[in-house]
Image: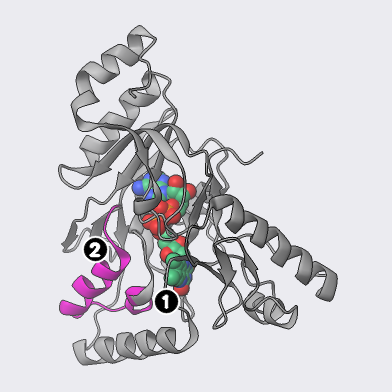
């Protein structure tokens, strides 16, 4: 069923963009954990330019339609009730390699997969993205979450980010304005979520191609040894200062604990796997249980690394 277009602004928006949208679409296939309800309107961006996506999103804002953007859905738990308004799934991949001054040498669209970017860089003898070889999701999500691994992260390479929002239109934010910290940015903290990242400029070092490949192979092997395969959202909680969430959860007896179709991995206690017919509610109930168990055993309150999207009571 098509959601009603009950205002002139909404009718104008649908007249312009309606043929690009799908209606009442299940979201699960667009998320790494394979969960979430339906989106009223869905736009999957695979071609065009980031500016085309920004135009569509800004028109939706003008029609007062709520909008949320995801990339790989690898760091968001979407409620079983889904997403009201428009969900944009950004898979528009593109990068240019050159010299834009100040050492900026890569311009990458936000919908580019991190793993693809790592490979594109490696093929050109550009290092600094080796850590991303095993990290699912897109550059956009990584900019928001300050994704990283093996002691490296986005904060170390982002020079500036181009984004669109209602207040300022299309503009740039510098690395300093992003206020990066461990798995944190000013964008992740922003409550309104009414922004769209178009692209980013990165500053990355030239390195020997064989060294880059060796590092990526080492990181891939490490991930295979220490992390489970299967549908998940990666690390659920941030590591508290001086400790590891996985260690705390394991010592609180969480490995293998199950709620419905959600199960704590037996390989890594900070991962929850969708082991079949898992609902977002199962996943969240298990998260709550894990946090309570660590609080009771260690007196430490774990902080979520993932974000909750949709209506969560
Ligand atoms: C198996 C597994 C392993 C993982 N390992 C790691 C790891 O080692 N290190 C790590 O840091 N993370 C890890 N993660 C988490 C995840 O891969 C990263 O956080 C990744 O950067 C998320 O990118 P995404 O595109 O999937 O973001 P999404 O989950 O789609 O979105 C995350 C946030 O960014 C916003 N967003 C995304 N794109 C845009 C855009 N273009 N404009 C505006 N907002 C946007 C969303 O609205 C949301 O708020 C792992 C996840 C999995 C499933």
Q: Quadrant of the N terminus?
A: top left
Q: Earlier in the sequence, mark 2 or mark 1?
A: 2
- Residue in the image at 65% along x and 61% along y: 287
| Horizontal and vertical percent position of residue 148 | 45, 71
Residue located at (33% from left, 23% from top): 2
Which residue is rendered at x = 65% and y = 72% of the image? Answer: 257
Residue at mark 1: 229
Is residue 24 rendered to the left or right of residue 305? Answer: left
Residue nearer the viewer, 200 or 310:
310
Which residue position holds label 2?
106
Main SS, magenta residues: helix
Corner quadrant of residue 166: top left
For ligand 1, the image quadrant comes to bottom left
The front one of 240 and 18 is: 18
Identify the secondary structure beneath mark 2: strand
Q: How many marks?
A: 2
Is residue 122 on the magenta stretch? yes
């Amino acid at each position: 069923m098509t959601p009603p277009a009950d205002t002139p602004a909404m009718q104008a928006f649908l007249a312009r963009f309606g043929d690009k949208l799908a209606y009442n679409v299940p979201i699960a296939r667009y998320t790494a954990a394979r969960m979430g309800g339906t989106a009223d309107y869905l736009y999957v961006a695979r071609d065009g330019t980031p500016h085309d996506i920004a135009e569509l999103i800004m028109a939706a804002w003008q029609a007062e339609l709520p909008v949320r953007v995801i990339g790989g859905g690898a760091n968001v738990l979407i409620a079983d009730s889904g997403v009201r308004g428009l969900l944009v799934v950004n898979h528009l991949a593109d990068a240019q390699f050159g010299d834009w001054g100040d050492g900026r040498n890569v311009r990458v669209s936000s919908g580019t997969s991190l793993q693809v970017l790592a490979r594109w860089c490696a093929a050109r003898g550009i290092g600094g993205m080796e850590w991303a070889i095993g990290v699912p999701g897109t550059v956009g999500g990584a900019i928001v979450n300050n994704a990283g691994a093996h002691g490296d992260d986005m904060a170390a390479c982002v020079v500036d980010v181009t984004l669109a929002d209602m207040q300022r239109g299309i503009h740039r934010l510098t690395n300093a304005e992003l206020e990066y910290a461990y798995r944190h940015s000013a964008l992740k903290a922003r409550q309104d979520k009414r922004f769209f990242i178009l692209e980013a400029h990165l500053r990355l070092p030239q390195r020997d191609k064989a060294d880059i490949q060796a590092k990526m192979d080492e990181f891939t092997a490490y991930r295979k040894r220490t992390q489970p395969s299967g549908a998940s959202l990666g690390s659920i909680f941030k590591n508290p200062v001086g400790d590891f969430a996985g260690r705390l959860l394991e010592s609180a007896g969480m490995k293998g604990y199950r709620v419905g179709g959600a199960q704590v991995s037996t390989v890594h206690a900070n991962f929850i796997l969708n082991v079949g017919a898992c609902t977002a509610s199962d996943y969240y109930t298990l998260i709550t249980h894990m946090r309570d168990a660590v609080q009771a055993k260690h007196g430490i309150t774990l902080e979520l690394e993932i974000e909750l999207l949709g209506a969560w009571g």
